[in-house]
Image (cartoon, rainbow, N blue to C red):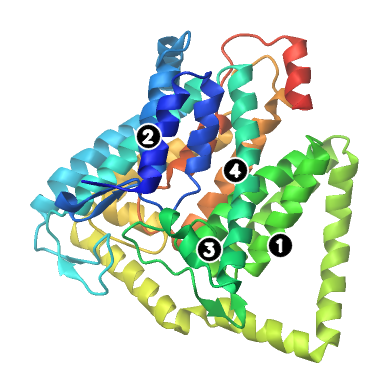
Amino acid sequence: MTIELIGIIAIAVGLASLFFEPPFIVYVFLSSTLLGAAAAFTLPSLGGTNIPPAHLLIGFLAIKLVSTNAFSKRVTDGLAAENPGFWLLITLIYSLATAYLLPRIFAGQTFVFPARTIGYTLPLEPAMSNVTQSIYLIADFICFILLYTYAGTIEGKRTLGNAALVCAALNLMFAAVDLLTYFTGTTELLSFIRNANYGLLNETELAGLKRITGSFTEASSFGAATLGYFAFTIKLWLSRIRPRLTFILTGLSLFALLYSTSTTAYVGLAVFLAVIYLQTVVNALRRPINTQTLLFIAGVPIFLPILIIVIAMNDSTSSYIKDLLDTLVLNKMSTDSGIERSSWNSQAMQNFFDTFGFGVGNGSVRASSYPISVLASLGIVGALTITLFLISVFFDRGRTNLSNSKFDIYRQAAKYTCLAWLITSLASGALVDLGLPFFVFAALACSRSIAPAASQDIRALVRT
């Protein structure tokens, strides 16, 4: 085992968190999920497997939150059959079984693109990725159930909501530092958070623009993460929660998405904006709206045509935009990357049929679309349990006497974030693991208050 500098820092901060109140480790943990290109530890004995800082800090998060009052009662509630935690637990148990059994049962009967891509197919057999992907899924479940129980209180929802805003700001700061170090030739300054054994694409340009990677491995990862935080902040702005701060974060996140030159970001942003615009219009027909919502509904159909006209009137700008869209979206599937990803999906579906709908096991295969990855890895049964988990997250209204109040806004914003990340996963999700950040916001999205909240707590939530 090799410990890295960022790992030493993570351990030191984790140990320090034991002497602070729970919000401290929650802020630290959520912030650490931004370090997508970092490895706290490297395990050569497990094929050079990386242990990210967030997966290290989740242990300290567990130690701190388990010691809080009524933790066992909230865990029991979270795992009840009518709650999302139940379906996530069933998915976890089933995926662990598939990771061990299916690569052995169907060994040699189909060819797969391995989870750690090597550019060509191999006969199906048990692999180290079955172990590592199972560990990641276990971490996802622990993260979800810990923060689900923590978000069952006013303090928990307020802390998670504020921590998400901090992450949105930190993500933009990493993007700015990424650009600054690139143009000044000082990218080595970020080497301590870009030390994982992944393919790092943080010094590439496209159409004359530096592709923003921030603290992630590539532009698509940065674009997907930024879209999630954009979704969170725009919902808060539309709901008039800290409007100045959320407006600034929303605007800067939108700019970062447009500048990122990420196909994932562009497609995800277009689909997400279309969905929330329609939802906002429908909601406006049912109830009174505030100034921000009115500006959003009226501004989008006015701003977009004006922007298109301005671009069309400038020959050089319109030519550049056309070339950029051709490269990133319209002709994407004819590029080497597009052809490779199409072959992943095609072979993954072949794996599904070759195994009679059972799948090849979690961690055995790589695809380029989340539904295809789930079907190829976990088969029909696993796809069903994950679907039931996602449905219960998005359509859970919470058990609280304060539904449809300002107390509920963070939960709604978290659902927006999960929706945005699910959209990007539909377009480019390679594995069954949706990542720790998704389960952080899923926990907040479906959190349920056990005890009634006082009115002063609600006012405090809105002020903060």
Q: CA distance from mark 2 to mark 4?
A: 20 Å
Q: Quadrant of residue 336 in the image?
A: bottom left
Q: Amino acid at mark 2?
A: Ile
Q: CA distance from mark 4 to mark 3?
A: 15 Å
Mark closest to the chain's N terminus, 4 or 1: 4
Residue 397's disc is: none
Instruction: Please tell me how crowded label 2 is: few (under 14), some (14-19), or many (20+) other residues with Cα within 10 Å.
Output: some
Residue 86 visible to the viewer: no
What residue do we see at 33% from left, 48% from top? 4
Q: CA distance from mark 4 to mark 1?
A: 17 Å
Q: Residues at badges 4 and 3 in contact (C-beta under 8 Å)? A: no
Q: CA distance from mark 3 to mark 2?
A: 25 Å
Q: Quadrant of residue 254 in the image?
A: bottom right
- In the rendered image, which quarter contains the C terminus? top right
Which residue position holds label 2? 11
Q: Quadrant of residue 24 in the image?
A: top right
Instruction: Please tell me how crowded label 3 is: few (under 14), some (14-19), or many (20+) other residues with Cα within 10 Å.
Output: many
* Residue 62 coordinates in the image, percent (x, y): 39, 24
User: Which numbered disc, 3 or 2, marks the residue closer to the eye?
Assistant: 2
What residue do we see at 49% from left, 28% from top? 25
Q: Amino acid at mark 4?
A: Cys
Is label 3 in a helix, a strand or a loop? loop
What residue do we see at 44% from left, 36% from top? 389
Which residue position holds label 3? 213
Residue 255's disc is: 1
Is label 1 in a helix, a strand or a loop? helix
Mark closest to the chain's N terminus, 1 or 2: 2
* Residue 72 coordinates in the image, percent (x, y): 40, 11
User: How many numbered circles are shown?
Assistant: 4
Q: Amino acid at mark 1?
A: Phe
